[in-house]
Amino acid sequence: MILLTNTLSAIVALVSVVLSVYFWIVIASAVISWFRVDPYHPVVNAIRRLTEPVFYRVRKWLPFTYSSGLDFSPIAVLLAIQLFEKIILDSLRQYLAMM
């Protein structure tokens, strides 16, 4: 039982770190979109490759996130990350604490 609890705790911690890193990547993508940067720069290219597939799906599922030339899909992604962390991961942490 202890092995299962520790394994699940490690998985929850890993998912939390991955979500936190992706949260900051989404913020970086939004900030980069405000400026004229070289799209062929390796960092900009990597950030775009990491975020654009998710932004595309959000724009497809929630068409109101793109209006009047403003793209609100990064905000929707950030909210989804925060909700997932607060609801799912915190619930798993509480469950693991009770085990």
Image (cartoon, rainbow, N blue to C red):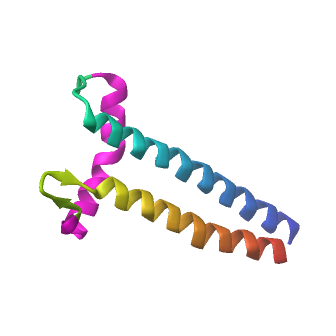
Q: Which residue occupies 57% across, 64% down?
A: 85
Verify whether residue 48 appears in magenta. yes
Who is closer to the viewer here, 28 or 57? 28
Q: Is 94 rendered above or below residue 74?
A: below
Observer able to see residue 99: no
Side (left or right) of 78 relative to 29? right
**Quadrant assignment, res 46:** top left
Q: Which residue occupies 28% across, 47% down?
A: 52
Verify whether residue 50 appears in magenta. yes
Image x and y of residue 42, in percent = 34, 24
Side (left or right) of 68 relative to 42? left
Side (left or right) of 67 relative to 17? left
Instruction: Give the position of the C terminus as an image quadrant.
Output: bottom right
Extreme left residue here? 68
Q: Which residue occupies 83% across, 64% down?
A: 3
**Quadrant assignment, res 58:** bottom left
Q: Is 56 rendered above or below residue 38?
A: below
Instruction: Give the position of the N terminus as an image quadrant.
Output: bottom right
Extreme right residue here? 2
Extreme front residue here? 68
In this rendering, the count of numbered labels is: 0
Q: Which residue occupies 83% across, 77% down?
A: 98
Image x and y of residue 72, in percent = 27, 57
Observer able to see residue 69: yes
Q: Is 31 rendered above or below residue 22?
A: above
Where are the magenta residues, as a range? Answer: 41-64
Image x and y of residue 97, in percent = 82, 71
Q: Main secondary structure of the magenta part?
A: helix
Q: Is 14 rendered above or below residue 36?
A: below
